[in-house]
């Protein structure tokens, strides 16, 4: 009986420990470029006490390029999360996201003097960098949190000089801040 109890406690303890390693972060936020709402959901696995690896999706209305002003943009990304003060009820975290934005380019152009810029393709490279504060309120260390993050889009842009008739391709980026509140499950 002693061995069965030890085996049961060992298995149950490992299940509880692994359950605390998996988290789901769901939030709603406001894109500060236009004060439009958006949301994100991120699955996170704590590889160690302070480092989490995850993947997520989000959707915010922001300017992804000079020719795509105020466009609803979805993104899928991988995440690296640094958790601080793990043994306290109030915790801080930093995160870095990297993935792909999904949007449709338009045929309009942006003009700056003699230079005319167009975006030739759909989609772009997504990047996010942010920090937040969470207060855990459940036994599984879940609870409400707030975060501030910078979301960006990198894309290829064709530049045409109307004075010299030269053409070239450049990399452009644009981004905005997002303020969000959510819950960690």
Image: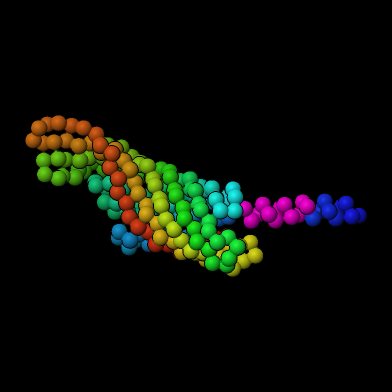
The residue sitting at 32% across, 55% down in the picture is 176
Left or right of 97: which side holds 152? left
Q: Residue furthest right?
A: 1
Q: Quadrant of residue 143?
A: bottom right
Any part of residue 22 in sight: no
Q: Is 13 in the magenta? A: yes
| Position in image of residue 169 (x %, y %) | 24, 34
Q: Nearer the viewer, residue 182 or 70?
A: 182
The residue sitting at 70% across, 56% down in the picture is 16
Principal secondary structure, stretch drawn in magenta: helix
| Position in image of residue 68 (x %, y %) | 27, 48
Left or right of 16: which side holds 74? left
- Seen in the picture, residue 16 relative to 163 is either above or below; the reply is below
Locate the N terminus and report the quarter of the image it occupies: bottom right
Any part of residue 176 in sight: yes
Left or right of 72: which side holds 40? right
Q: Nearer the viewer, residue 174 or 3?
A: 3
Left or right of 12: which side holds 40? left
* Magenta highlight range: 10-21
| Position in image of residue 165 (x %, y %) | 12, 31
Q: Quadrant of residue 9?
A: bottom right
- Tell me how the rendering is colored: rainbow
Q: Is 8 in the magenta? A: no
Locate the C terminus and report the quarter of the image it occupies: bottom right
The residue sitting at 32% across, 51% down in the picture is 175
| Position in image of residue 119 (x %, y %) | 26, 40
The residue sitting at 53% across, 48% down in the picture is 54
Q: How many marks?
A: 0
């Amino acid at each position: 009986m002693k061995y069965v109890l030890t085996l049961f406690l060992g298995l149950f303890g490992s299940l509880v420990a692994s359950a605390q390693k998996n988290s789901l972060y769901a939030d709603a936020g406001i894109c500060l470029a236009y004060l439009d709402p958006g949301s994100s959901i991120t699955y996170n696995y704590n590889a160690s006490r302070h480092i989490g690896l995850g993947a997520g999706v989000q959707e915010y209305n922001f300017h992804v390029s000079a020719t795509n002003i105020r466009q609803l943009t979805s993104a899928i990304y991988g995440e690296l999360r640094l958790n601080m003060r793990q043994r306290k009820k109030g915790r801080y975290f930093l995160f870095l996201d990297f993935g792909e934005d999904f949007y449709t380019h338009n045929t309009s152009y942006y003009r700056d003097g003699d230079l005319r810029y167009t975006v030739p393709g759909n989609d772009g490279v997504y990047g996010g960098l942010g920090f937040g504060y969470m207060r855990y309120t459940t036994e599984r260390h879940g609870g409400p949190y707030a975060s501030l993050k910078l979301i960006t889009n990198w894309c290829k842009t064709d530049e045409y000089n109307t004075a010299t008739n030269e053409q070239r391709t450049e990399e452009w980026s644009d981004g905005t801040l997002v303020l969000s509140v959510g819950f960690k499950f």
